Amino acid sequence: MDRIFLFPYSSSSKSRIHFFVLLSIYLFLSYAYKYVDDIFYVTILYQFQNLSAIIIAFQCTPIGFLFIALLILLEIIHSLGIYFIIGDSHLLISLSSRLITLIACFLISSSQAKQLYYKMQQEKLIYTDDFTGLYNHRFFLKELSIQVENCLEKHSHLGLILLDIDNLKLVNDNFGQDAGDSVISSTAKLLQGIITSPLTLYRYQSDEFAVIVPFNRSNQLEDIAQHLKKQLDTLKNDFIHAPLASYITFSLGYSSLPSLAKDSHSLIKQAEAALYHSKNAGKDAIHIYEDILKNFNQDVTTENKHLISIFKALLASISMKDQYTLGHCERVASYAAKLASHMQLDSEQINAIHYAGLLHDIGKIEIPSIILNKTAPLSEDEYALIKKHPIYSSNILEPLLGMDESIDYVRHHHEHFDGSGYPDGLSGTSISLGARILAVVDSFDAMISERPYSKGMSIEEALLELKRCAYLQFDPFVVEHFITLMTE
């Protein structure tokens, strides 16, 4: 908590200037009255000097008082030396005035120091996480905003790493809440030992930590994230008691500004999306946020390019409503393109399937967040609304010229091979091949993903489920190719 407890006049350039201006006035007055013969003006200058000393002690506590006390003591010693040499009684009056000023400065400075101490204690309570002693989420948001502003002004680089403790729920379930708390506390201590200035560490959420990283080299942020992960894996057994350590791994996600994010809000969202990707890719991993639409501009028709910013905004809005959806769309697009390539489709079909995978859930923007993030079973009305999202998605995409195939795949990716799907009840090969591919990879990613209301399956379990549902929900030909792709 060093930053909170620094003297205010050592950490602000404006405050330092203020202090030196006041000190310069004091020093000027200490010499000015010596060159004035009129006793009236000497007295006025002398009192102004005393007043400036009191102002410095009041406004620049405690550094101001220390400087003033030193100067006054030097003046007293100097005056005493002159008094003993020439015996001028007027010097005693000057000395008594200086002593009174010194005492006044001490009393004022003591009062200010007490107030400063209480203020720092209040700041400590406001900005410190009680459990770990780290900076808390509130201070993280405040500090990130300041550092982002400085970064943009100086045209420098800033990274954000989010770290999650994997399998903490498993520890809580098997060993109790106290064991889980012990893991969090031990991880905080471990991180404090690893992370040094200029990096700063925060407790982001219950089992998540944040690290703000100023950096210079292009690959420096990646190196720092890799080093952090390696240190955590190496040292965890020294901090987390056995057998708890055997359950614990760490997932990291990170992004940077200004190369990826443009402000603090987007930096947080991107790091969260990257962390979520790590969690859903099997945990114990590191991912950097990637702009999933970065290549979109290169391939769409000129007429459609003006819509790209709209779709980016829609995907960002979905991410804010439902953190799962954006990462899910990215993974579905990747799986779908790989499967289409494995099935030896032509490049135009692969691109159409890739874009459909990316945008297939964009219609969820129309569905309330409370339904998207609900952990309890959905009501009939809520499920009926969820089932409309393929229609919403295709309607949103309809203005795109030359993307009819992708729009068809998006609309029909929840159709079932046996005709029991939605929204149009299509069956068999009347469902376009792209939609049948999306149906398989969409379900696969949903099955292996960990959600608040369900634990993800293993890849092997998900592939067996796809095989079981072939001819019913899925095209067996597509399932066979996907299983081959995933087991090669």
Image: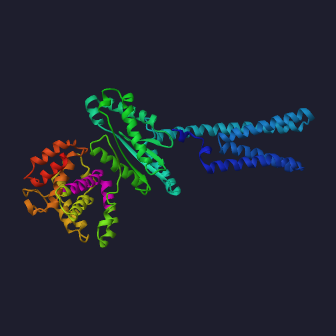
Q: Residue furthest right?
A: 86
Regarding residue 222, the answer to whether it shows in the image is yes
Q: Which sits in the foreground, 7 or 244?
A: 244
Quadrant hosting residue 192: top left
Q: Is residue 307 left or right of residue 414?
A: right
Q: Is residue 457 left or right of residue 144?
A: left
Q: Residue furthest bottom?
A: 303
Q: Which sits in the foreground, 161 or 149?
A: 161
In the rendered view, tell whether residue 453 sits above or below residue 346: above
- Residue in view at x 25 percent, y 72 percent: 401
Image: magenta residue range = 313-339
- Residue in view at x 31 percent, y 72 percent: 302
In the rendered structure, does residue 437 fall within the stretch colored magenta? no
In the rendered view, tell whether residue 250 sits above or below residue 244: below
In the rendered view, tell whether residue 276 sits above or below residue 114: below
Q: Main secondary structure of the magenta part?
A: helix
Q: What colouring does the structure picture have? A: rainbow
- Residue in view at x 34 percent, y 49 percent: 274
**Residue 90 in the image, given as x and y percentages of width and height:** 89, 39
In the rendered structure, does residue 334 fall within the stretch colored magenta? yes
In the rendered view, tell whether residue 182 sits above or below residue 320: above
Q: Which sits in the foreground, 441 or 108?
A: 441
**Residue 47 in the image, given as x and y percentages of width and height:** 79, 46
Q: Is residue 159 left or right of residue 76?
A: left
- Residue in view at x 21 percent, y 56 percent: 336
Q: Which sits in the foreground, 228 or 128?
A: 228
